[in-house]
Amino acid sequence: MERRGNVRQFFGMSKQGNLKEAAKGLDRPQMILLLSNNEQFEEHVQGLEALYPGVPSIGCIGMGYDTHVVEHGVVLIAYFDGIVAAANVLEEVSVMPVKYIERLEQDLRKVNGSHRDTVCIDFCAGNDACVLTTMHAALRRQDISLVGGTGDAGKVSANGKVYEDAVAYALVRNQRGRVKTYKENIYQPMDEHRFIASKTDKKNYVLGELNGHSARQVYQDILKVTERQILTQTFQNPFGKLNGDDTCIISIKEVQGNALVCFRQVNDSDVLVLLKLADYKEVVRDTIQKIRADFPRPSAVFSVNCLFRYKLFTEHGYMQEYLKEMSALGKHAGLVGYGEHYNDQFVNQSMTCVVFE
């Protein structure tokens, strides 16, 4: 474990899913993030609490990484030295996440942080857009940023217990420095292809029509792809939802008749634009430069990279190079997510991260 600045970030892993091997060398952590495979998730959650009783922790099912991706094992990312942390869960998120918001409000008082030094990291098991709106309402009173992602299989953990239909969160305050969050988008708009969405089904993330025509047919006609090719073409050409100067990326999940089912909610009258892949290597270099300008000596970086980005980078032979470039910032580790969170935004095919000074 290398020291850079004040906060220290530990990364441990086992490709075989051996929790004790992953925890080797981890002494007196103050906050732990667990990334596990589906088969061993509950065993790992219980084992972690037995190894580090009472230490705040959250977990989800998903791949983790530092300089390499651990595809099917267990990863521990932990923080110690110079932090104050709290972890908990909001339950029944598909029905009413606000029911448990007092837990987050209490933890905010306990951590006693500000936008300058505190971040909220979350792992969600569903209903992401509603959850993020609910959490943001509490976090914005102190202007605290949120970074996180959706795990697999509808399960998360907090403090040694497994939950379904829930969001697990960790508040981490840097006692001796700043924190700052970033969002990276490797796509650019095809401005000639803007649409008004209609015939949407918010609950099931269905996009029925674009400018009054079948969403499936519009996508196929513009990009000259077959119906079967749509699900791989979305790596190159997702949709973007325009929100002021910002663009939220929306990936296509499946075809449903003449409609498209997406990985996040689309509403009637949303303004969408078709996106195309930019020079992603240049975008990554720009992100690293921005971070370096803000933090000449970062202590740690935690990021969430979309599963589709992971697949795209792997297909293009870039994933290892990407992780190597990010590791030049210092200690870098993260989660391959099924949807990325940035403050109150639920986005796809993006990278979000928090940097600790």
Image: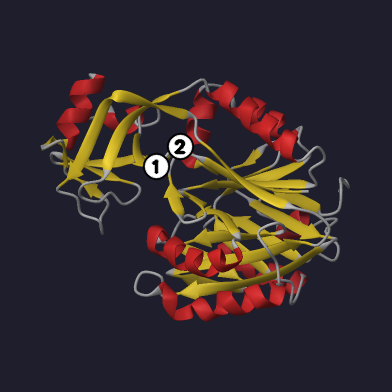
Task: Determine whether, in the image, residue 180 is placed left or right of residue 298.
Answer: left
Residue 7 is marked as none
Q: Amino acid at mark 1?
A: Gly
**Residue at x-position 67% and y-position 52%:** 75
- Residue for badge 1: 244
Assess whether mark 1 and mark 2 are in contact (beta carbons under 8 angstroms): no
Image-quadrant location for residue 243: top left
Q: Which color scheme does this rendered protein use?
A: secondary structure
Residue 188 appears in the rendering = yes
Residue 158 position in % (x across, y down): 60, 71
Position above or below: 209 against 148: above
**Residue at x-position 26% and y-position 21%:** 223
Is 273 or 320 nearer to us in this picture? 273
Position above or below: 40 against 351: below
Element type at mark 2: helix
Residue 182 position in % (x across, y down): 60, 43
Element type at mark 1: loop
Residue 170 position in % (x across, y down): 63, 65
Position above or below: 123 against 311: below
- Residue for badge 2: 308
Image-quadrant location for residue 184: top right
Sequence-first disc among 2 and 1: 1
